[in-house]
Image (cartoon, grey):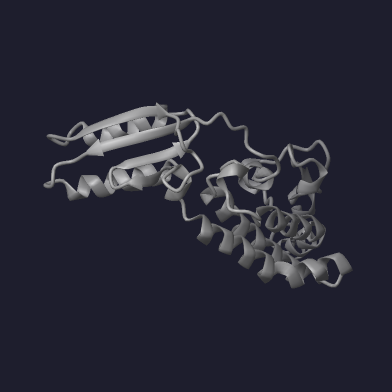
């Protein structure tokens, strides 16, 4: 929850470091090649060239262990994990060229356009609780995908203007503005089956502190049993 509510709140610390993975798999191992690419994608890597994949940062231990597990049994497979810096980081042959930044920017712009009417309605107090629960959940799900797929590159590697901040502001207005209404609706639909719903159901209010969003609602100081918590 905190990961996607704080995503984009602050520019990333940038040291210029990248982790690079290079691998060679015999032509008899297409299944292994597919498994490696799938694993690299899951670890946040993107293909710079066919068998050269990169991701920003310095943390390489998890991907090194995954490659060892996948490729050690494959006869003739070779791989390397390196820490690198690019001489022309922002150039047309630099690492940013490996990302579909145009598509990502279009996704942010589409998010803003899709939720602009809801944002206005939320500011005006013109959203009922039932609509708030569905719409807020939808916006949360859409924003979560950005937090999981955007590589969070520094500004000098991004096309300008970069629309993520507008999308984040749209999301936070909806998320914060509709939180209490969505909680009200969730309590309404669950109370017939769960009499203590109002005690346990909470909602996160991200705009209080973008660094540490906390749940709101429920009974202060009460601890929620894992099997009975309903947080959104």
Q: Position of residue 18 (x, y in %)?
A: 46, 33
Report whether 87 appears left or right of 107: left
The residue lying at 63 percent from left, 64 percent from top is 109
Q: From the viewer's side, name the closer residue of 114 and 96.
A: 96
Residue 138 seen in the figure: no
Q: From the viewer's side, name the closer residue of 92 and 72.
A: 92
Residue 65 seen in the figure: yes
In the picture shown, does residue 118 fall above or below 166?
Answer: below
The residue lying at 57 percent from left, 64 percent from top is 106
The residue lying at 38 percent from left, 34 percent from top is 20
The residue lying at 54 percent from left, 58 percent from top is 104
Q: From the viewer's side, name the closer residue of 135 and 123.
A: 123
Report whether 154 appears left or right of 19: right
- The image quarter containing residue 15 is top right
Q: Position of residue 146 (x, y in %)?
A: 57, 53
Q: Position of residue 170 (x, y in %)?
A: 73, 60
Q: How many dots with numbers? A: 0
Report whether 180 appears left or right of 231: right
Q: From the viewer's side, name the closer residue of 178 and 25.
A: 25
Q: Position of residue 52 (x, y in %)?
A: 32, 41
Q: Which quarter of the rendered picture does the N terminus lie within?
A: top right
Residue furthest out toward the right: 124
């Amino acid at each position: 929850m905190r990961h996607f509510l704080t995503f984009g709140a602050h520019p990333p610390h940038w040291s210029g470091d990248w982790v690079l993975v290079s691998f060679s798999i015999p032509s008899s191992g297409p299944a292994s090649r597919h498994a490696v690419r799938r694993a690299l994608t899951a670890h946040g890597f993107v293909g710079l060239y066919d068998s050269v994949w990169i991701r920003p940062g310095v943390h390489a231990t998890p991907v090194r262990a995954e490659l060892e597990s996948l490729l050690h049994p494959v006869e003739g497979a070779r791989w390397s994990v390196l820490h690198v810096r690019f001489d022309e980081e922002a150039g047309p042959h630099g690492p940013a060229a490996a990302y579909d930044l145009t598509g990502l920017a279009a996704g942010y712009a589409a998010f803003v356009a899709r939720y602009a009417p809801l944002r206005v309605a939320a500011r005006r107090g013109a959203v009922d609780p039932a609509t708030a629960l569905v719409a807020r959940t939808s916006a949360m799900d859409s924003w979560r995908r950005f937090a999981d797929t955007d590589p969070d590159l520094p500004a000098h590697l991004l096309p300008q203007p970069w629309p993520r901040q507008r999308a984040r502001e749209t999301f936070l207005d909806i998320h914060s503005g509709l939180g209490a209404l969505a909680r009200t609706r969730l309590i309404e639909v669950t109370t017939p089956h769960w009499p203590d719903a109002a005690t346990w159901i909470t909602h996160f209010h991200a705009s209080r502190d973008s660094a540490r969003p906390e749940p709101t609602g429920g009974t202060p100081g009460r601890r929620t049993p894992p099997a009975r918590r309903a947080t959104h």
